[in-house]
Image: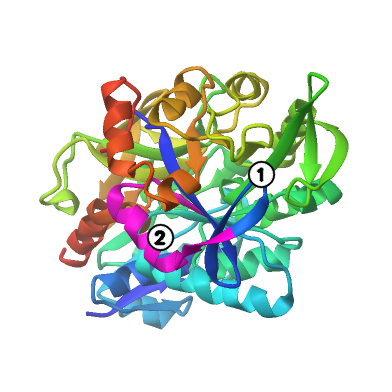
Amino acid sequence: MKITIIDYGAGNIQSIQFALNRLGFEGILTNNADEISSADKVIFPGVGEASSAMKKLKNTGLDELIPTLKQPVLGICLGMQLMCNHSEEGNTKGLGIFDTDVIRFSNEVKVPQMGWNTIYNLQSPLFQGINGNEYLYLVHSFYAPLSENTIAITNYETEYSSALQRYNFYGVQFHPEKSGIIGEQILKNFLNL
Amino acid sequence: MLTKRIIPCLDIKNGRTVKGINFLDLRDAGDPVELALKYCLEGADELVFLDISATEERRKTLVQLVQKVAQTINIPFTVGGGISSVNDVEVLLKNGADKISINSSAVNNPKLISEIAKNFGSQCVVVAIDAKLINENWKVHLVGGKVATELDLFDWAKEVEQLGAGEILFTSMNNDGTKNGFANSALAQLSKTVNVPIIASGGAGMMNHFEEAFSLGNADAALAASVFHYDEISILELKQFLKNKNIPIRL
């Protein structure tokens, strides 16, 4: 299986590679359009700030390529947020794959949310074999509210989408590569799609 | 519900784990990768590695260690100690660290906080603050607690939050190594002063100290070293204890 991890200079992609290695797979780290298009699975990571990450995507033309991909694509954390319509962070126009906006937590709670929280109402083959209320590791200040594309819910200040799906596109707010064996199971499920 | 985090801390010198009392008298406490894996399997929520060696040669050892830890464990970890530039941060993140922690270098050059936040995001910037209660004022100390400053803990915490810190690791030097509990009233005040998560550090000796750090100190996470290294407290038992006390905990 050919797995590519989109390397556009935003994020700790080494951790995703190491997680794949633990599962017995090897990812190709690249921003090359052919390598990405010809992959069986594409992982779209990202941490950091939305507008500068989007700028990096545009510089390499990846903002046009990603929405046209036909194989399963998994956005992680900021990667997921960039696949939405719009993010309040840096007033950033997203890739418009998931039909939702991304907004900030209020100051009624500690921001960023940092740590382990549960996911529930799981509605996708991505969560095959995962019971509701398992803990995943999250670190984020912005979130996608519940929408038609929600496939998992987490509660922090309010119920929001901790995972999204539309067609072949999947997005998770949590870090499967840093969420113990449950996270690794979700990565494995993605590779099995 | 977001859970409170239990974070074992590994002080690293020349690639080995060490532990002292009140920042002094360092003793060998084992192989960091082995310990990291052990903690991970016992249910640690995160790990912190603080490198207390200094020279360039030892830095290279640290990068190798970071990579080995990242390959081995599947939970987040923070690396701190001697980080003074955006380039230092980049090397550690690229090798698999999730967050970095800065201390003296942030006081000497507060702009470093915003530069790291801008380049890699606030989520990876932990500002560690060592403070000591002197005449009823919490004063920030540097260089592993050796150098006193005029900075007030709460003013400095507010400033680092504004500069883009994603989390604050507060070590009370009065409590560190005493095993008499965390500095709970200072922690509670810190939580009121800033809106980023606070990691409590210094003073863990018994399981109820952790409970107090969360219930009285309102901390988001609690860090300890020796009680875990020397098997005085098992992480799994600690987490069960806290859960029984109705503290939100991942089990």
- Indicate the position of residue B73 as horizontal and vertical percent values: 36, 62
Q: Position of residue B27 (x, y in %)?
A: 56, 59
Tell me the quarter of the image containing the N terminus of chain B. Answer: top left
Figure quadrant of residue A190: bottom left
| A71 versus B20 height, above or below | below
Mark 2 — on which chain does it sit?
A: B
Look at the image and tell me in which quarter the C terminus of chain B lies.
top left
Look at the image and give the residue range highlighted in magenta: B27-48
Identify residue for label 2. Answer: B36
Between the residue at mark 1 and the residue at mark 2, the CA separation in whole angstroms equals 23 Å
Helix, strand or loop under label 2: helix
Q: Residues within 10 Å of mark 1 (few under 14, many from 20)?
A: some
Rate crowding at label 2 as few (under 14), some (14 to 19) or many (20 or more) other CA atoms within 10 Å.
many
The residue pinned by badge 1 equals B22
In magenta stretch: residue B44: yes
Q: Residue at x 35, y 31 (%)?
A: A160
- What is the quadrant of residue A111 in the picture? top right
| Residue B130 in view | yes
